[in-house]
Image (cartoon, coloured by chain):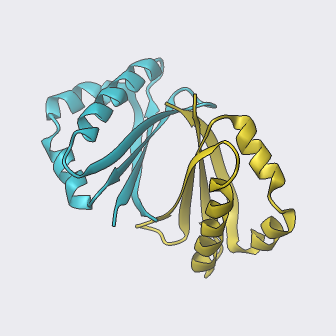
Chain colours: A yellow, B cyan
Amino acid sequence: MSITRINEFQAADGKAADLFTFLKSLKTYISSSPGCESCEVLQSNDNDSLFVVIEVWDSADSHKASLDNYPQEDMAAAMPLIGAPPKGGFYHS
Amino acid sequence: MSITRINEFQAADGKAADLFTFLKSLKTYISSSPGCESCEVLQSNDNDSLFVVIEVWDSADSHKASLDNYPQEDMAAAMPLIGAPPKGGFYHS
């Protein structure tokens, strides 16, 4: 059974556009990861600095493998764009 | 351009299973509404009383029309299942 990962990101002040660009690049990486069934990057209509990433995976292990294989230096480079610790969780239908 | 509506529901104490059943019935109604492109009802893996409903619409007007046409007595009957005011917002990709 597929699982859904929902992550919420808050951009740092003045970094919303840059974070949106980064998250869209992340979408390309995530979507091409083994076991990823879909990935959507969304910006709030009410709050430009609020983003939600919705990923559907065939398993939690596939999600973890994708996370583990992501270049750490790219993730580190994106940290200044993020204004608060991302919130996330797994969901099922 | 499609829009995504994300709503978060917290079940009242002991009502998680009933709320999940209600939200799944809502999914059938929402999915058949004009302009609805998809609707997912998800339960948190970490917190059984937390639910997220993700709807994709062709426009905010279609979402509003669906909401306006939903039988108010059915919505009222579900209120005891909900433990806190639902949180929701529109998002775009």
Q: Residue at x 28, y 32 (%)?
A: B28
Residue B8 at what x, y percent from top left? 45, 43
B85 is higher (above) or lower (below) than B25: below
Residue A48 at what x, y percent from top left? 49, 72
Q: Residue at x 57, y 79 (%)?
A: A17
Which quadrant holds residue A64? top right
Residue situated in front as seen by the camera: B85 or B23: B23
A22 is higher (above) or lower (below) than A58: below
Q: Which residue extends farthest bottom?
A: A14
Residue B52 at what x, y percent from top left? 46, 40
Compared across the picture, whether B7 is left or right of B63 comes to right
Compared across the picture, whether B1 is left or right of A56 comes to left
Residue situated in front as seen by the camera: B10 or A2: A2
Residue B2 at what x, y percent from top left? 34, 61
Which quadrant holds residue B53? top left
Q: Residue at x 44, y 26 (%)?
A: B12
Give the total of numbered labels: 0
Q: The N terminus of chain A lies in which quarter of the figure?
A: top right
Q: Residue at x 58, y 76 (%)?
A: A16
